[in-house]
Image: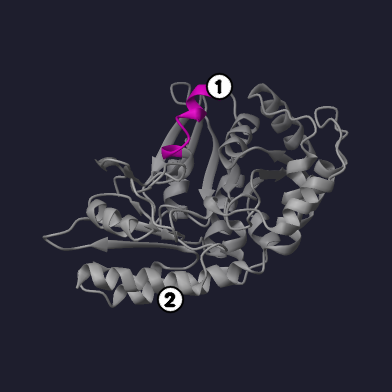
Amino acid sequence: MNPSKEHTGPGVHTSWYEEDQCVPATAPTHIVDLRSDTVTTPTPEMRRAMAEAEVGDDVFGEDPTVNRLEALAAEHLGKEAGLFVMSGTMGNQVSIMAHTNRGEEVILDDQSHIFNYELAAMAVFSAVQPRTLKGNRGILDPEAVRRAIRTPNITSPRTALVTVESSHNFGGGTVYPLGTLREIRRIAADSGVAVHLDGARIFNASLATGTPVRELAAQADSVMFCLSKGLGAPVGSMVAGTRTFIQRARRARKMLGGGGRQVGILAAAGLVALERMVDRLREDHENARVLAEGLAALPGITIDLNWVQTNIVIFHVQRQDLDAPALILKLAEQGIKAFSMSQDSIRMVTHKDVDRAGILATLEELRKILA
């Protein structure tokens, strides 16, 4: 896939990227927003928790709500310590900063979020070189990882880190099999190389495979996951690892300007997300399956149902009279938001703020447009 941005009309921006907008000049009153699970709004319980949060100065380690969240995140993942960060990108980057030294190399999938959608931050902040591999829908082959790890050589960079992403965003929500993660971890450990798991949607991956999240997290030295996607919190992500690693990551967070003060107001919503919102992700997966199966029955649409594993649905438009950006525009006119990832592919993401009725309404509008 070759994600691209397209400006295709006044008041409308059709784009693959999660933070961009897709709003028609005259917006419909009812919106079904399938652009991303980042558009979720905090629950009433989260808002109450935020209003009542006990706070302190987090840079001094004195915010009790942040401390509770970091401890709970570490417990969920089976790690020694946790760190609250403002975003998944910040979480990934402080992890790379903590694992690597300048001039080293990081192995990762060529469609990974870290490589494509974090503004070359690993080069800017860590001064490390990416070594990309071609995965299968984002899933790296352990043998390819083994071959890519460099042997010590005075003319080559040292391989310091392997990053994996599960579920994989632009692979279509695909999930690493546990055995594959284990083998990558074994290969990396044998060569003295660390593994970082970009687990922005790790709880989706866990529910999809039936593998406890602690077992997935055990296959990496550090893990990042987002509170602000399917879990519904308004902001924030978590990093977890050993205490020594988290100390380094905390310093990196401060260097990036991410040292918060009374951020327990934000962490309070994260606590509700972890304690209340994980199991309901199953509903998003069920809605994604209904959406995918409905899409498969539409003329001019192709989709491989075998790759719809979590809450992300990527499909292709194969018509002479209509491409993906044009279809996005027609959907937007009916109050349905999605992303065109290329001239012929579209991504839709299910989440708590789109119910089954919204999914069926989307399919009905698509039937009308494609008829």
Marks 1/2 in contact by CB < 8 Å: the verdict is no
Magenta stretch, residue numbers: 115-126
Task: Say which mark, if any, is on residue 311.
Answer: none
Q: Quadrant of the C terminus?
A: bottom left
Q: Residue at x 63, y 36 (%)?
A: 95
Side (left or right) of 116 relative to 321: right
- From the viewer's side, name the closer residue of 337 and 282: 337
State whether residue 361 appears in this view. Answer: yes
| x, y percent for residue 230 | 58, 58
Q: Which label was assigned to residue 290?
A: 2
Measured from the top left, where is residue 309 in percent x and y? 47, 68
The kind of secondary structure element at disc 1 is loop
Amino acid type, residue under disc 1 in the picture: Arg
| Residue in front for this viewpoint, 339 or 314 | 339
Looking at the picture, does residue 87 appear above or below residue 171?
Answer: above
- Please tell me in which quadrant of the rendered image residue 81 appears: top right
Residue at 70 percent of width and 25 percent of height? 254
Labels 1 and 2: the sequence-earlier one: 1
Return the x and y of residue 44 as percentages of the image width and height: 71, 58
Mark 1 highlights which residue? 102
The residue sitting at the left extreme is 320
Three-letter amino acid code of the residue under disc 2: Val
Residue 33 vertical position relative to residue 111 in the rendered view, above or below: below
**Relative to 73, residue 353 above or below:** below
Q: Give the CA separation, mark 1 to mark 2.
A: 47 Å
Q: Is residue 364 magenta?
A: no
Q: Nearer the viewer, residue 203 or 40?
A: 40
Q: Would you say 311 lies left or right of 333 here?
A: right
Residue 310 at x, y = what percent? 50, 66
Mark 2: few, some, or many residues within 10 Å (few <14, many ≥20)?
Answer: some
Q: Is residue 121 magenta?
A: yes
